[in-house]
Image: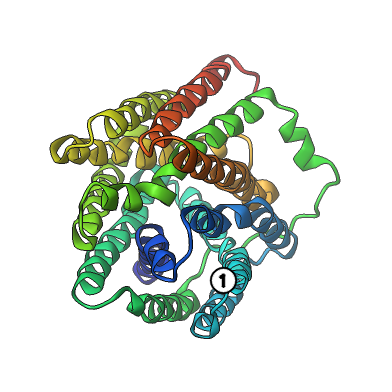
Amino acid sequence: MTPLVRWAFGSFFFLYFAYIGLVSPFASLFFLDRGFTVIEIAILMSMLQVTRIIGPFSWGWLSDYLSNRIGIIRFCACLGALVFTAIYFLHSYISFFIWMFVLHTILSSLMPLGESATVHALFKDNSFDKRYGRLRLWGSIGFIVMVLFAGELFQRNSIELYPLVGAIVLIALAAITFLMHEPKLERHKMVKGEFWVVLLNPDVRWFLLSGFFMQFAHAALYVFYSLYLADLGYNKFQIGLFWALGVFAEVVFFYYQSKVLSRLDPEVVLQASFGIGIIRFVLMAFLPITSVLIIAQIMHAGTFAAHHSAATKLLQRWFTGPLQARGQALMATVSYGLGGTLGGLFAGWIWESAQPRDVFVVSAFACGLAGMAIHKLRPYQNLAR
């Protein structure tokens, strides 16, 4: 990667996660301002995950078939920016539902294809452990900048500015994709059944199951954390600070990622991540005081950043060459798509029928199930290669 291309990929991560930093903490508050109920908001927010069930894998298959990831990224980024502007013309609940589904089906392509392009370029240079975290941390910085900026903006003015901020970010994201490039992809003939052969590996299935439960656990965080904090009496700017703290912890991990992944097997990192997740969600549920919530947010370095980096590296063990984009997309589909969707809907039901804290109790239990799944992986050094 040349310095300009690294800058383009870093900017891509920055702007994409700036958008996520707008949606995750503030979309639920925007919908609440529109008069929607908690369960209606949960359904709308679940579209972020529902669209990852079909979308990423479909885009991944197309990119593997065409051997043109960057072209698809550019097309989807431009189309997504255009669709987002339709928010100004929406009024009914059903129109918002359709809009969320269409918009995030398009945007669901960006991260798995962006990740696979980055991984491809870095593995070509034999620099994954050294540079991946340094590029990926710009996504965390983008998230932090957005939650702080938007939290202060909405606190001083109004959540009505949400559409304007989102449109600006997605237009900038579309523009930056025209500076992105990756090493030339060899055009492989797609072998019928090749992908399914990989899925017959039990280790792959256990790995995907662990990802499912981890995102099932985090769905409560992404959908209800802002509402949980609001119920505890925190204002919008303070809510933004809590989100920023968690993502700042990500930045620290991503910066030092090479020191961790060069010394520990990814399976070990994943097990540690699931253990931290159990502790984090229990603390959030039963000790929701400021000092403890701060500690819980710092644990995001383990439950998200460490998990994401280790899972991305472990995925390369099975999905390489013409299977790479589909492998990334499959992980997004099973974990963020299925896991996030079912986790979000289940959390919405728990929120309405029990106590808000119980959604995080369920999250802790799901982290435990994720740890049990990854424990089933066979030792890599003993496998035939």
Which of the two residues, 265 or 187, is positioned nearer the viewer here?
A: 265
Residue 193, x across and y down, in percent = 84, 41
Which quarter of the figure is the N terminus placed in? bottom left
Which quarter of the figure is the C terminus placed in? top right
Residue 148, x across and y down, in percent = 22, 64
Q: Is residue 2 something that shows in the picture?
A: no
Quadrant hosting residue 59: bottom right
Q: Is residue 383 above or below residue 74?
A: above
Q: What residue would you read off at disc 1? A: 96
Q: Is residue 48 above or below residue 173?
A: above
Q: Is residue 57 above or below residue 276?
A: below
In the drawing, does residue 35 fall left or right of residue 25?
Answer: right
Residue 158, x across and y down, in percent = 28, 76
Which of the two residues, 263 or 200, is positioned nearer the viewer here?
A: 200
Which of the two residues, 187 or 232, is positioned nearer the viewer here?
A: 232
In the drawing, does residue 257 fall left or right of residue 156?
Answer: right
Q: Is residue 207 something that shows in the picture?
A: yes
Residue 164, x across and y down, in percent = 38, 82
